[in-house]
Image: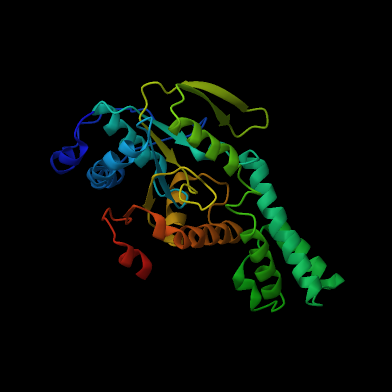
Amino acid sequence: MLDLSILSSTWTAPSLPEEIPHGDMPGDKVSINESHIAKANVIFPRLLSLLPDVLERNPAKRAVVSVCGGSGVGKSETASLLSYYLNQLGIGAYTLSGDNYPHRIPLFNDAERLRVFRVSALRGLLAAGEYDAARADILAKMMQQGREADPALRAEYPWLAIYQQAGRQGLSGYLGTQNEIDFKELSGILAKFKSGAEEMFLKRMGREEAALWYDRVEMRDTSVLVVEWTHGNNDLLAGVDIPILLNSTPEETLAHRKLRARDGAPDSPFITMVLEIEQGLLQSQAHKAKIVVSKSGELLTQEQVASL
């Protein structure tokens, strides 16, 4: 294998073809732009400096890298570039999408998120003695409009603060937990890879109910598994050696989602709440990241991350 510790200070980014391989999430669209390239080019030398020790410590000479961050921040594109750069150096790399490992397809998971929020919110309102028939009618109309999570409505309906707070608490107990995601299966895959498995069956989950299957993937020549996923630095995920955090604020993440038009209502009050909760989870675990990059493409120290 190449001397990566030396190469980390002399590496030069190669020219890119029109298309490069990307993650294994069915139907995922990866559109690489200059900002993604700039981030990857900042990350890669640092990654090369960390990999030798990880590879040396693993009996199978393998490592798991994760690229995590808020929705739409560029995880898929950055991870694809890192894998491409490694492969260009003769270090076999494969990009795995963690979005294949929720318990439910996206449509059903979105519905479950909303159900958890609403049930928790209603129970909170009941527990506080603030629920009655008139408010039930008001809430029904808000639900039809998708506005019951809108904090601006509290001025007119002060009791809605109790509803939203209880719903948010319930949602926080679902997002990024075992209830939402099969961390056990993915952790098992990472362990199998690091044990030297020459081939593995990897899960595929599309956006339709019947789009669920496993592909056999050759790993004989793969030394680095790159996991691109919001929850790639989650405490419940075991086996990641080098977590990389693409740092962003909820506002920046929301702007990315609008550009991608990934959801029918990317700026709805409920989606905004989801992004805020996910951002809080990312920030609470940011101290474990080995590499952190700002939205503008600068490497951040842990002190800088803590101050953001």
Question: Where is residue 61, by image quadrant?
Answer: top left
Q: In the rendered image of this protein, does residue 244 appear above or below residue 64?
A: below
Residue 100's x, y, as percent? 55, 36
Residue 24's x, y, as percent? 47, 30
At horizontal 68% and vertical 64% (from top left) the residue drawn is 167
Residue extending furthest toward the left = 10
Left or right: 212, with 12 as reference point: right
Residue 237's x, y, as percent? 52, 46
Regarding residue 221, the answer to whether it shows in the image is yes
Nearer to me, 286 or 75:
286
Count of residue discs: 0
Nearer to me, 4 or 125:
4
At horizontal 63% and vertical 38% (from top left) the residue drawn is 105
Q: In the rendered image of this protein, does residue 226 appear above or below residue 213?
A: below
At horizontal 68% and vertical 54% (from top left) the residue drawn is 114
Q: Quadrant of the C terminus?
A: bottom left
Question: Where is residue 255, by image quadrant?
Answer: bottom left
Left or right: 304, with 107 as reference point: left
Left or right: 47, with 201 as reference point: left
Residue extending furthest toward the right = 133
Question: Where is residue 5, by image quadrant?
Answer: top left
Nearer to me, 46 or 230:
46
Nearer to me, 177 or 195:
195
Left or right: 122, with 146 as reference point: right
Q: In the rendered image of this protein, does residue 139 appear above or below residue 235?
A: below
Which colour style is shown? rainbow
